[in-house]
Amino acid sequence: MKDSNQAKKRVLLVDSDEAFATVLRRALGEGYALSQVASSEEATSSLPSDEVDVVLLKWDDRDSQNLLKQAQELEPAPPVIVFSWDTCHETAMDAAKDGAWDFFVQPLDVLALKFALDRAHRRMSLARDLAETRKLTSNQPVEGLLGNSKSMQHVCEVVHKVAGVLTTVLITGESGTGKEVVARAIHRLSARAQKPFVAFSACALPESLIEDELFGHEKGAFTGAAQSRRGRFEEAKGGTIFLDEIGDLALPLQAKLLRVLQERTLERLGSNAPVAVDVRVICATNRDLEKMVKEGTFRQDLYFRVSVIKIHIPPLRQRADDIPLLAEYFLRMFAKAHDKRARSLTPGFLGALAGYSWPGNVRELQNVIERSLVLANGQQLGVDDLPPELKGLAAQDEIPRGSFEEAIRSFKREIIRSSLKLHNGNKLRTAHELQISRCYLHRLLKQLNIEEQADTSLEEDVDLTKEPVLEARLQ
């Protein structure tokens, strides 16, 4: 039989006061599995296991600082919530600088503590999912292609199959989806991996320049041609050439490219002598080539030649399941590149990423992560670190920046309203669900200016014998 504690939020209390642990365990209720150790030294042996979701730490400076540092070195790192009798603002700031998830001054407000524990538990669950995903993808058959979605798994399968043959490949997809990444993956898996990979984009270049870039020229072929020059095809000898935005090629250039693909030879500008070409060709486009063939703007014979194998890269909005993994990957990549301390991503931050349409696809996501990391001040990337166009999409599951007390009041107001609505205004049931006394609920309704909802049912008898007794260390 499965252990019922697995469904609970597993909290490790670091405090020598056993009586306090007993009271706190009752106050938190059945949704939490609270275990206790007496010191930070004892806590270190429990942290590496998978039995802790959140650490609740009594602050005592040096030992607490050491525990925070050790917790942050774990993968994934469990959130640590600190509490103390010390009301000094500097104490809270020191704990935050050392990596504390949240800070509470005693006596503890149980409702506010539950909110913090729930948020920390969601963060740890997300971190575990990401860690598991990284394990599953670390040995992917195609290096560089991240994604657990079915569409990306299909792309990986096709890449693996076509890498060992010489046939041409056409990669389609919107701008920013990673078409060149796929082309490089094919090259790395092929027998030509030790030879050059040459990338060229025909986008927005004049026809004469494109021809010179691709095929090269002889000395004196045009004004300024002081010496002969090899083109991209010759530079890629024995390897792979990647032609991006092939749909932008003019019809005369399409004819010359077709000849290269058919005869495996080319002619430099200013020469009639054929040059043998030993190169694998991979093309890419964000345009509908079949439609262009019908309109007469793309040669049908060239289309058939370049599209022997077609690989379509879906837009990021159609594979939202891959966003957390990609975001985590870019976070680590840019943290290393910019010599920044690696941060974590809050649920609100990831929620905003998941709700965005990503017109710029993976390239835009990459830019958002880099911008957020460079400009962030805290230990995590949160909602306030998002660019303006994404902030409005963030889920409201994070403590808002600003006044700590106002943030707690806001959370209290929201949870009480939600519970009252659930129980049709029945305050006795609401108090029982929140595990507070009915008198305390009435005080909160008044303090928080909550309009009392209509109670359409009788105040039913509820067994309140299990209601926690809150001692001096709890409010």
Image (tube, grey):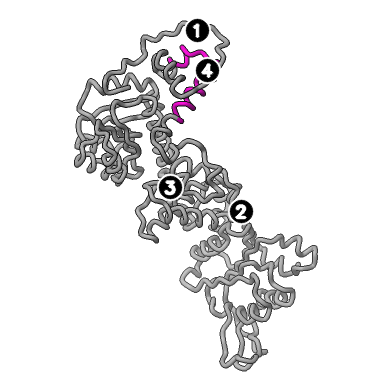
Label 2, label 4: how far apart the Cα atoms are? 45 Å
**Residue topped by disc 2:** 359
Q: Comparing marks 1 and 3, which lies closer to the viewer? A: 1
- Circle nearer the N terminus (1, 3): 3
Verify CB contact (< 8 Å) between mark 2 and mark 4: no
Residue 381, labelled with which disc?
3
Q: Is residue 409 left or right of residue 87?
A: right
- Provide the residue span drawn in magenta: 410-431
Residue at x 66% of width, y 68% of height: 246
- Circle nearer the N terminus (1, 2): 2
**The N terminus lies in quadrant:** top left
Residue 446: image location, x then y, percent = 45, 19
Name the quadrant containing residue 226. bottom right
Say what secondary structure mark 4 lies in. Answer: loop
Q: Nearer the viewer, residue 293 or 369?
A: 369
Give the residue type at disc 2. Answer: Pro
Q: Is residue 230 left or right of residue 475?
A: right
**The C terminus lies in quadrant:** top left
Q: Is residue 25 left or right of residue 344?
A: left
Label 3, label 2: how far apart the Cα atoms are? 22 Å
Residue 234: image location, x then y, percent = 56, 80
- Circle nearer the N terminus (3, 2): 2
Label 1, label 3: how far apart the Cα atoms are? 45 Å
**Residue topped by disc 1:** 459
